[in-house]
Amino acid sequence: MRIVIMGCGRTGSTLALLMSCAGHQVTVIEKSQDALLRLGKRHKCDVVVGDGLDEDTLRRAEVDKADAFIACTNGDNTNLMVVQMARELFGVKRIAAKVNDPVRAEAYREYGIFTVTSGSLLAGYLRDWMLGNPTRNIEEYNQFYPELRQLLED
């Protein structure tokens, strides 16, 4: 599988290394040379230094040939915009965005964008662990919890 990952922070670099070690062709887009150090010296990833919001950078990363595109920078807006570019401009079918705001993540899921909210995933998993409940699937953890919505809306 050809995978393009934008962002080489903790999440992006770990995902890039995992997928590369599993034999997939991985390209990482990153603005900061320092962030690329997270890949180590022996990684097998292709690297494109640049801003993923720039179409030329996406072309250099060959997003048009990607089977999957994942945006996992620290910026929700950036991630959501770039995955839409990957889908609409380059025809990538499997897109995902790391989104810190669970309400925004839920709204974009309604538009067919797979979003991952690490806070919701971790909180739900820890809740089940503490209560001795069986673990759930990602879709259940990845939602904005209805019980929290009620508390926050009051």
Image (cartoon, rainbow, N blue to C red):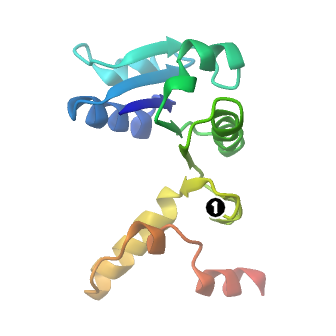
Asked if 32 appears above or below 63 in the picture, the reply is above
Residue that appears at 41% across and 64% down: 122
Q: Quadrant of residue 25?
A: top left
Q: Quadrant of residue 41?
A: top left
- Quarter in which the N terminus is drawn: top left
Residue that appears at 53% across and 18% down: 62
Which one is nearer the viewer's eye here, 108 or 32? 108
Circle 1: element type: helix
Residue that appears at 44% across and 15% down: 47
Q: Position of residue 87 (x, y in %)?
A: 64, 39
Q: Position of residue 20 (x, y in %)?
A: 28, 29
Q: Which residue is mark 1?
A: 109
Q: Local crowd at mark 1 within 10 Å, few (<14), some, or many (≥20)?
A: some
- Quarter in which the C terminus is drawn: bottom right
The amino acid type, in three-letter code, at marker 1 is: Arg
Asked if 151 appears above or below 9 in the picture, the reply is below
Residue that appears at 66% across and 45% down: 76
Q: Residue furthest right?
A: 154
Q: Position of residue 89 (x, y in %)?
A: 71, 30
Q: Position of residue 130 (x, y in %)?
A: 30, 81
Q: Quadrant of residue 150?
A: bottom right
**Number of dots carrying numbers:** 1
